[in-house]
Amino acid sequence: MRDAPGPGPDYDGPTYYDRPSLKPAPFNTTVVGGYIFLAGLAGTAQMLAALAHRARPRGFRRVARTGHALSLLAPTLGASLLIYDLHTPQRFANMLRIFRRTSPMSIGTWVLMAFSGSSIATVAGDWLGRVPGLRWLRPVGRAAELPAAVSGAALGTYTAALLSATSTPLWAAAPRALAVRFGASSVASACAALSLAERQADNHRTARDLDTIALAALGVELAASLACRRRWRALGLHAAEDTPAGAVLMHGGADLVGTAVPMTLHAAALAAPPAASRRGSALGSLAILAGSLCLRIGVLETGDATALRPRESLGFAQPKNLPRR
Amino acid sequence: MPVTAEGSVQTVHVHPRARDYPGSFLDGVIPQEAELTCGTRIEPGKSYGFFTDTTLCIGCKACEVACKEWNALPADQIGFTGMSYDNTGGLSANTWRHVAFIEKRGPTGTRQTDQAAFQSGWLMMSDVCKHCHNAPCLEACPTGALFRTEFDTVVVQQDICNGCGYCVPACPFGVVDLNPLDGKAHKCTLCYDRLKGGLEPACAKACPTDSIQFGEVPVLQARAEARVEQLQQLGVAGAHLYGAPEGEGATGGLGHLNAFFLLTERPETYGLPPAPTRPANRVAPGLLAGLATMAGLAVTALALLGGRR
Ligand code: SF4
């Protein structure tokens, strides 16, 4: 069960019969990875909706409405996935007994609550605000836009802090880089979803704007991905490279499909005339969405692998790796 | 026939044979029995823990058995792990004490030749939840099921836990675990129920060599330091504490471990991390970096969206 030595100063001290020194998170990686992806998409879609609305209230009306609609993914499918992953799901409401600031899971629960409430209000304003007798929903929806955007920004990135605030080596090793990576991936995924919707409506100019934002986000994501990888290697955490799931999800999925391919496609599409760029942009957007999901599942999978490998967990928990104070 | 002990409200059921020995009947539970068994008075508001001195451990696993019996915990696995005499394997939802068996071997993997003849090269160590001062499992728990008791121990309230599982990766020692059958997290309670009744925890009471000592944490810490000194003088150069305040095992903001150990080898030998950290210290950096990324990209987006025409 010993791992092939990788680059970097790897741990070669004793272990207890090579048995794990940590327990991996008992999360279903597909379910929780799916939630992290949806929360990121929904949260940042709401943030982008508010920004678009602010930039040009009339011209970007449809983007804003689509963003509001996408935000519903969090309170519906996203929350269902979270509850499904509990091992005693009928006690879901116990999450609302307390607020604990040392627990990103607790913080995230309340962020999701705030986001869900305000997002439902923005959608209600859009969909029912013209119905006679329900016109009061329009100002309510508009007032909900700011809280929805702010909680959405938090929803798009708190999941990285949730993973970092554990003892799982891969997650704990690079809290900042992981948060940047998750945040940027969330922004890219929301841009991709909104861009697809705009292309569907033949609104290529807005789609190009969204693709440009996605390109910027992908650049940030790529940089953070390199920072993560550097840190993991330096700490002797190789699960992201030498487990089959890790290699496929993190390299093939997150880095290649999720950033390199769409960056190329989007850049090419932006260089071409608006209508001609349609297919490349749509393909790029789909790649972003797939890559964003792969990133989350990949980080969960490979994190669990580092928890199960005593050489990686004991090598990580060495005095030389303690945070300097 | 149920026998009612005088002066106690409860009916005590005893084995029929036991009635042949009336002298063995206790008059109900002895109040503050721990004073008799380990010289410790158990009072709310004080800090209690274990000092596990591995140099005294003989690997009898009485602690494992006592824990299973008192807490009615089933066996984890029936079979061989294929390593040493340890078929327990490790701590889990159903195993709250685990005796590690390590046969010291030289660099070639054979018995060390510099060892005295007829001496065993065994290291034995009874592992347990550390009842951390800044307990990562407790700090991660989003329902408040994990709480700090009046005895300064860390316990999962089974009627509140919803099985989110977040405490499991939070623990730096791989202690707390979910039971897939009931969907809740489980770990050592430091015999919360026994402490309430003035009883020494089952493992410590059963330990025949006093390798597991129960008591007030400051008292145990002083005793442990004296023991290290004594061992050092006897020539056990490697003797040191794991989990003393800010020391090995209690690094990175954990403070100290209420259940701490005296080890003679480096902690990794027993599967323990030498320098664990407090996960809660990573909450702020993670959240702030994430929000800063969002803010930066939001400004970029606003510039791009507003810039056209
Ligand atoms: S050792 Fe693990 S389970 Fe025990 S108190 Fe510390 S964090 Fe919690």
Image: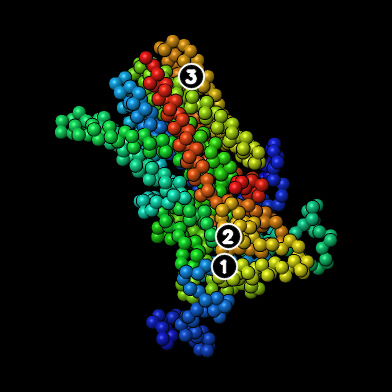
Q: Which residue is drawn at 38% across and 38% down?
A: A151
Q: Which residue is the site of mark 3?
A: A266
* Circle 3 or circle 1, nearest the eye: 1
Judging depth in this view, the residue of B161 and B131 nearest the camera is: B131
Q: Mark 1 lies on which chain?
A: B
- Toward the left, the furthest residue is A133
Q: Distance between the residues labelled 3 and 2?
A: 53 Å
The quarter of the image that holds ligand 1 is bottom right
Q: Where residue B35 sits: x, y (%)?
A: 54, 79
Residue A44 relative to residue B266: left or right: left
Q: In the rendered image of this protein, does residue B178 appear above or below residue A180? A: below
Q: Which residue is the site of mark 1?
A: B217
Q: What element carries label 1?
A: helix
Q: How far apart are marks 3 and 1 (CA)?
A: 62 Å
Q: In the rendered image of this protein, does residue B41 appear above or below residue A177? A: below
Q: Where residue A95 sits: x, y (%)?
A: 38, 51
Structural crowding at the residue carrying mark 2, measured as other residues with C-alpha within 10 Å and reported as few (<14), some (14–19) or many (≥20): many
Q: How far apart are marks 1 and 2 (CA)?
A: 10 Å
